[in-house]
Image (cartoon, rainbow, N blue to C red):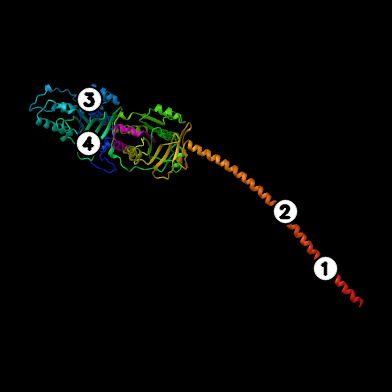
Amino acid sequence: MNSKPTWGDKTPLSSLPKTPTGIAGLDEITAGGLPEGRPTLICGSAGSGKTLFSMEFIVRGALQYGEPGVFVSFEEKTEELTLNVASLGFDLNQLQNDSLIKLDHVRIERSEIEETGEYDLDGLFIRLGYAIDSIGAKRVVLDTIENLFSGLNNQGILRAELRRLFGWLKDKKVTTIITGEKGDGVLTRQGLEEYVSDCVILLDHRVDNQISTRLLRIVKYRGSVHGTNEYPFLIDTEGISVLPVTSLTLDHNVSTERISSGISSLDKMLDNQGFFRGSSILISGTAGTGKTSIATCFVNQACLRNERSLYLAFEESPQQIVRNMRSIGLDLQAHIDKGLLTFHASRPTLNGLEMHLLAIHKLVERIRPEVVVLDPITNLVTVGSMSEVKSMLIRLIDFLQSRQITVLFTALTTNTVLQEQADEGVASLVDAWLMVRDIESNGERNRGLYLMKSRGMKHSNQVREFVITDEGVDLVDVYLGPEGVLIGSARQAQELQQVTGVAIRDHAMSRKDREIERKRLVLEAKIASLKEEFDSMQEELNKSYIEEELRKEILEQNRNQLIKNRHKDE
C-alpha cells in the first residue's frame, strides 16, 4: 500500500491512503491506486471490460498484495465467471479453496420487487457482511448495480438506498469497486452513482474505420491528483494493461556509447563510430531501395554483440524476411534460435494505433531488448492520420529512450511533395535520418544514400552509392564527372577509364623517360668530347708556352756565358 504516491517528478502529491490495483499502468495514472476504504465506480457500455477490470482488481489484490476480496455478481453466475476469466490465467476455484476470494451470485428478479416505503438493502448488507468477515476481505466488487435496483423507479428510495449502500461500505473500511452501465447522456443509467462515489472511472469501447479501441478515463478522484486524458487499454491473455501516456517526460538519461550500424562504410560516415546507444534512427526511401536490408544489418550486428533485439514487421512475415536476408549473407534464423532475435509481425489494421503502442510496450517489458526495429511505420497511416501516427511515435520514442533502447524506423516514401512533408514531420522526432533514393541514369536504376542528419556527432555530407550484393550491403564512393554524379555502370566505366588513363600515362611517362635518358647520354658524350678537345688545346698551349720559356732561358744562359767568356779574354 502506498500512502504517499508520486507523480512524474517523484514528489508527493497526495496523502490520501490508496490501494494498488495491480493492473499494469493504472496505478501510475491514479498516482498509487484506488482510494483505500472508499467506493469507486467503474461505468461503461456493454463489452467495455467492466467485469474483467473489477475481477482483476480482486485477483491481483489477493495474489500480489495479500488482500482477500469478495466478488458479488448480480448478473453472471459464479460458474460462468470462473469460466470467463480462465482465459486470463485466473483459477477462481483454487483461489476460493485457498480462502483468498469469495464469489457470490445474488439473483434478483424485477417481478419480485415491489416499490414500497419499506424497501431496503438490509438483506444484502447481511449477506455481504458475512462474506467479508468469512475471509477477512479488504476488497469488494458489486457487479452490476443496475440489476440491484432494476425494478425501482422511485428516485427518492433509489437515492436513499444508494447513499446507504455507499455509507455502509465505507463503514466496513473495504476498498470497493461498483460497476454500472453507461446511461443516456449521463455516466450511469440512474445518474446518481457518480455523485456519491469518491472515484469514477469511465471505460469506452470505440470502433473507428473498422478498428476497435478500448479507452479509459478517470472522470473524478476526490482528494488526489490523477491523469485526466483518455488512456488506451488492452485485454489479452495476461489481463488488462493501461498505457499511461501523460507520464512520459523529457527527462531520461542519454548515453555517449556508440554502436555499429552493421555496415562498416556507414559507420565511417558517422564519425567512424556508428549511432549513439538509446537513440532513434529513421531510414526512409522509395520501394526497393534496401531499407529492410539496412535494418536487418543493424539487428544482425546487435545480435552478434549478444544483445536482444525486437523486430516489429508490418509488411512481411518473419519467414519472408529471414529467407530474403539469406540472399545478402545474413543468417537471422541463427539469432532466432539463440533467443537473441524476436519477430512480431502483424497487419496495422489488426489494432488501432493506441493498441499497437500498448502491444509494443508489453513486448518490450517481456523481452527487454536493447534494439527495436519498426518496419515500416508508414503502414500505420492506414489506421490513423499522419498527425496521429506522429503522436504515437513520440510516445514510443520517449518510452524506449527512457530505457536506453535504440530504435530504428523504416518509412516508405513516394517522391511527392506531400510525402516529403510527412517524412520531415517524422524525421524531426529522430536523432539520425538516413535517406535512400533511386538515381536513374544510363538506362539503369541505382541507389544513393544520403545522411540527412545525425545529432551530436560529426557526419559525412557526401552522397554514397548503396549497393546490395551476395556478400551483404556496402557504400561506395561516387564519382563526379562533367555531367554530375556517376553511379552504377557509369561509375564502373569511369573507374575503367581511369585505370586505362593511368596505364597510358605510365607508358607515356616511360617513353619520355627513355628519350630523356638518351638525350642525357648524348649530351654527356658531347661534353666529354669537348672536354677532351679543351684539354688537348690547353696542353698544346701549355707546350708552346713551356718551349718559349725554355728558349728564353737557354738564350739567357748563352748570353751570360758569352759575357763571361769575354771577360776572360780581357
> Which mark's residue is nearer the viewer, 1 or 4?
1
Q: Give the residue pinned by disc 3.
A: 103
Q: Is mark 1 on a helix, strand or loop?
A: helix
Dot 4 surroundings within 10 Å: few (below 14), some, or many (20 or more)? some
Range covered by the magenta-colored residues: 370-393
Cα gap from disc 2 to disc 3, whole angstroms: 128 Å
Q: Tag 1 or tag 3, which sits nearer the N-term?
A: 3
Looking at marks 2 and 3 on the same chain, the residue that comes earlier in the sequence is marked by 3
Q: Name the residue under label 1.
A: 553
Q: State the mark number for residue 529.
A: 2
- Relative horizontal placement of residue 276, taking residue 246 as reference (left or right): right
| Cα separation between marks 1 and 4 | 140 Å
On screen, 532 above or below 504?
Answer: below
Quarter of the figure with residue 40: top left
Between marks 3 and 4 in the image, the one whose residue lies nearer the viewer: 4
- The residue where tag 4 is placed is 218
Tell me whether circle 2 and circle 1 mark residues in contact (CB < 8 Å).
no
